[in-house]
Amino acid sequence: MTITNKVSLKSVMSGNTPIADVVDAPTIGAATAGTESATVAYTAATTGGTATSFTAISTPGSVTGTGASPITVSGLTGGTAYTFKVYGTNASGVWSGVQSAASNSVTPAVATSFESIASASGTGASTITFSSIPATYKSLQVRMWLQTNATTGTAFLRANGISSSVYSYHLLNGNGATVTVSGLATQTSAILFNIQDNATSSGNVYIVDIQDYASTTNYKTIRSFGGIDLNGSGNVSIKSALYQQTTAISSLTFDASNTGGGFGGTATIALYGIKG
């Protein structure tokens, strides 16, 4: 007599401890592309063991993500087409070796270092404010073309609408003949931007970087580089400032109210988020 022993995966023992029933393959849903990522939907099987986790795995690359439906799979290569399969794992960390069918093919977008957040033009405004700045970037950059409607003046930068003495700065200006160095330990604005009226100036260009703006534990470092072209003469300036608050920066205000005419119609301020 021949006796055949059949061992079911559902009755496998580990020592004297039974391993939980393995999970049957889920039903695949739609995959949706993100930026260097994708989300993969699925429906758990109604048969087999109970899953404690589900994993989505990519083809090509075998990049995985784990979680409830839809699963996010990060770390994909932008511009590459992917499909995904999903499988479940039981409480003993065992899966049946059976995966779902492959998903539809998706191609994640290529991530960019800079993303435009907002921009504004002068049109006589004495202040320009960018509010509700998302805290999703590593740092911020502002690019400015400044002119005033009236006389020579100065524009100020303030964070979160605060005009009390929580700022300090250092300033280096040069015009080809002389160099000016100055600094203040505390003042009511972060950085001074010299601007000229439309009649005498062909451009006042500045680039401002704000580091760790979303931090809630550190002061914020602000750096500026720019200059003024006065139709053949002018100056170049390098400035650094410190916003002495641990609160994350959620708004930036540029104030040209002391010029008498506000920002000129050709003035443009653009805000960008930097991811890394």
Image: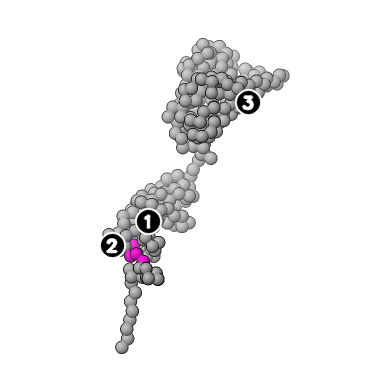
Query: Label 2 belongs to which residue?
Result: 47
Label 3: how many Cα within 10 Å (few below 14, some 14–19, many 20+): some
Type of amino acid under label 1:
Ser
Give percent across and percent down for residue 251: 46, 27
Q: Which of marks 1 and 2 is nearer the N terminus?
A: 2
Q: Distance between the residues labelled 1 and 2?
A: 16 Å
- Name the mark on residue 53: 1
Q: Which of marks 2 and 3 is nearer the N terminus?
A: 2
Type of amino acid under label 3:
Ile
Whether the magenta-drawn stretch holds residue 134 is answered as no
Query: Label 3 belongs to which residue?
Result: 238
Q: Is residue 205 above or below residue 61?
A: above
Q: Which residue lies furthest to the left in this view?
A: 46
Q: Range of the magenta residues?
A: 19-24
Depth check, front residue: 135 or 219: 219
Q: How far apart are marks 2 and 3 (CA)?
A: 68 Å
